[in-house]
Image (spheres, rainbow, N blue to C red):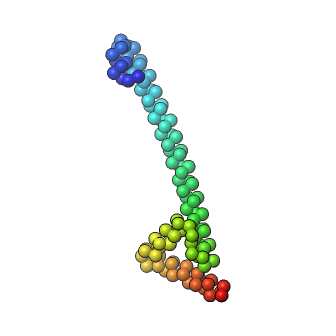
């Protein structure tokens, strides 16, 4: 029911009561929808954080074992590090050193 429908078919007192009820309904609905969306966003953020942590752990494990990362997200992280400023280059050179030492030891 819309505001114009209430105003058209009701007397003044009835219209005020109807509009008040309609207003309360919409406010309540948006409160419920907003709370549901906020909760869903929090859950999704936790899932993304957990997934990201797993990818980073797997990436470090792969680099320490001398294995080229197969996970596409880990490969993206490696590519981002390789295109980052000098501080990241130092990190990647350390990872490369560990990888090459691991390869030399395994021979």
Question: In the rendered view, would you say 99 is above or below 34?
Answer: below
| Quadrant in which the N terminus is drawn | top left
Question: Which residue corresponds to the image point at 34% horizontal and 18% vertical from the top-left?
Answer: 7
> Quadrant location of residue 71?
bottom right
Residue 44, horizontal then vertical, whole percent: 54, 51
Q: Is residue 74 above or below residue 6?
A: below
Which image quadrant is residue 96 in? bottom right
The residue lying toward the viewer, choosing from 68 and 8, is 68
Which of the two residues, 75 or 38, is positioned nearer the viewer here?
Answer: 75
Q: Nearer the viewer, residue 30 or 61?
A: 61
Q: Is residue 76 left or right of residue 4?
A: right
Q: Does 7 sit above or below residue 25?
A: above
Residue at (49%, 68%) from the top-left corner?
A: 76
Q: Going by the picture, which residue comes out furthest to the right?
A: 106
Could you tell me residue 24's position as x and y percent? 45, 26
Q: Residue 74's spot in the image, x, y percent?
A: 54, 68
What quarter of the picture does the C terminus occupy?
Answer: bottom right
Residue at 62% in and 87% down: 104
Give the residue at x 36% y 14%: 9
Q: Which of the 4 quarters of the picture holds residue 16?
A: top left
Percent coordinates x, y for residue 78 in the rendering: 50, 72
Give the total of numbered labels. 0
Outermost residue toward the top in this view: 11
């Amino acid at each position: 029911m819309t505001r114009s429908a209430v105003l058209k078919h009701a007397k003044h007192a009835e219209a005020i009561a109807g509009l008040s009820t309609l207003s309360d309904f919409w406010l309540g609905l948006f409160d419920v929808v907003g709370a549901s969306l906020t909760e869903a966003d929090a859950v999704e953020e936790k899932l993304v954080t957990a997934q990201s942590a797993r990818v980073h752990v797997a990436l470090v494990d792969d680099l320490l074992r001398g294995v080229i990362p197969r996970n596409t997200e880990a490969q993206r992280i490696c590519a981002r590090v390789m295109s980052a400023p000098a501080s990241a280059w130092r990190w990647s050179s350390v990872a490369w050193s560990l990888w090459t030492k691991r390869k030399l030891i395994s021979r």
